[in-house]
Amino acid sequence: MTGAFFLGWRYLAFHKLKTTILVGSITLMLFLPAAVRLLVNDSATALTARADQTPLVVGAAGSPLELVLNALYFHAEQPPALSYDNFSELRDAGLAVTIPMYTRFHSRGSPIVGTTLDYFSFRDLNLAAGRMMGMLGECVIGANVAARHKAGVGDSLVSSPETVFDIAGVYPLKMNISGVLAPTGTPDDNAIFVDFKTAWVIQGLGHGHQDLERPQAAASVLNRSEGMVTANAALQQYAEITPENAAEFHFHGATGDFPLSSVVVVPPNEKNGALLRGRYQNNAKGIQIIVPSSVLNDLLDTVFTVQNYIILGLALLSLATVAVITLVFLLSQQLRKGEFLTLSRIGASKTYLATLIASEIGFVFTGSLVLAAGLTFITRQYALQILQIFLGF
């Protein structure tokens, strides 16, 4: 029977296109359901792990899912703004550690996250190089940002304008990199962290310019009257914060009205957490307090339901694929009647011919099974990286 296996192998090797199509079809039939299940399960694990580490999130009334995705994963969709006064009230209550978050701007595709140093200790983020930001305009970047932009300590990144034509005259801010974070395999690797006041500067709520009281600024003065100085178009506004001009930066308007995206709340115990949730239950100020894990569990219930429908659809498609492959083999046998007749005349038995046909089918399915197993193994090893590329989580 060794000859039958050899002839079967040589037939498949000769008809390369037919063999490739058959092997590819069966490989996808076996691989796709396993890949869908692996990616969904791993994405669920990654999502819930970060949510489970975040006890509470406070934000303005709106979509809880949108708030969680922005606060935890720096999603591009913006939830309604929370005022700084709301954060101050929450912080002054003294019931929990409160971490402000302002995630609105980007730099070359990477989210700029305005927060405080408490965020780094909360997420257990460590520096691979440099130091934490210590003044306005400094930033700490994630490991993936450093690799993607080939940037490190001492380099700089520039914030991207939200629109091509900014009629408000808000200039992109050049941010000096003070530190690079060690990789964590989380969305923090893809973020640029600044103090939340730096994010306000990027928005144009604060700026720095020449001191018009100084003699050197005489060319920028349009008019002086009764203690008021009016600047002309020559007034120089700074697009970078340095130790030399940091004192010139200031904010206009009531700071309490300035925006934040959310506040991550870390109560020391369940009692404080319950008190906070009760305080903001049916809050008349338009503030909501949510448990991120509960919100994501509701989302994942929907995802798993959709996954089951997808796998059912793939199963039906697999049945159709098996039917087509069976038809291909049957038609192939009809076209090869002359070949089989010749083999019979030179002494091949019916068992030999059956073994020949079975060997061809066996080689195709074995090759497909090996390829599908290899692709599944690769997906298993790199599922999180794949998810980070396509979903950003």
Image: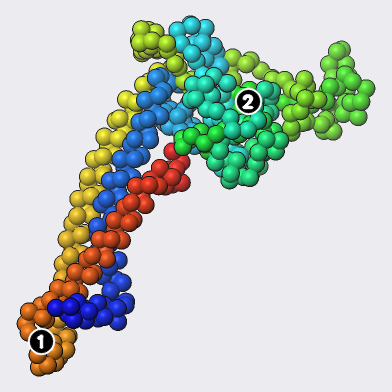
Tag 1's secondary structure? loop
Number of dots carrying numbers: 2
Task: Name the image quarter holding the N terminus.
Answer: bottom left
Q: In the image, residue 342 lies at what x, y percent?
A: 14, 92
Q: Earlier in the sequence, mark 2 or mark 1?
A: 2
In the image, what residue type sits under mark 2? Met
Report, in whole angstroms, how far the alpha carbon at label 2 lies from the one at label 1: 80 Å
| Residue highlighted by disc 2 | 132
In the visual, does 221 lie left or right of 341? right
What's the mark number on residue 8?
none
- In this rendering, the answer to whether 236 lies above or below 262 is below
Q: Residue at x 71, y 35 (%)?
A: 154
What's the mark number on residue 348?
1
Which residue is nearer to you in this view: 303 or 54? 54
Which residue is nearer to you in this view: 18 or 346? 346
In the image, what residue type sits under mark 1? Ala
Of circles 2 and 1, the one toward us is: 1
Q: In the image, residue 385 lies at what x, y percent?
A: 43, 45
Camera sees residue 353: yes
Q: Residue at x 17, y 86 (%)?
A: 336
Tag 2's secondary structure? loop
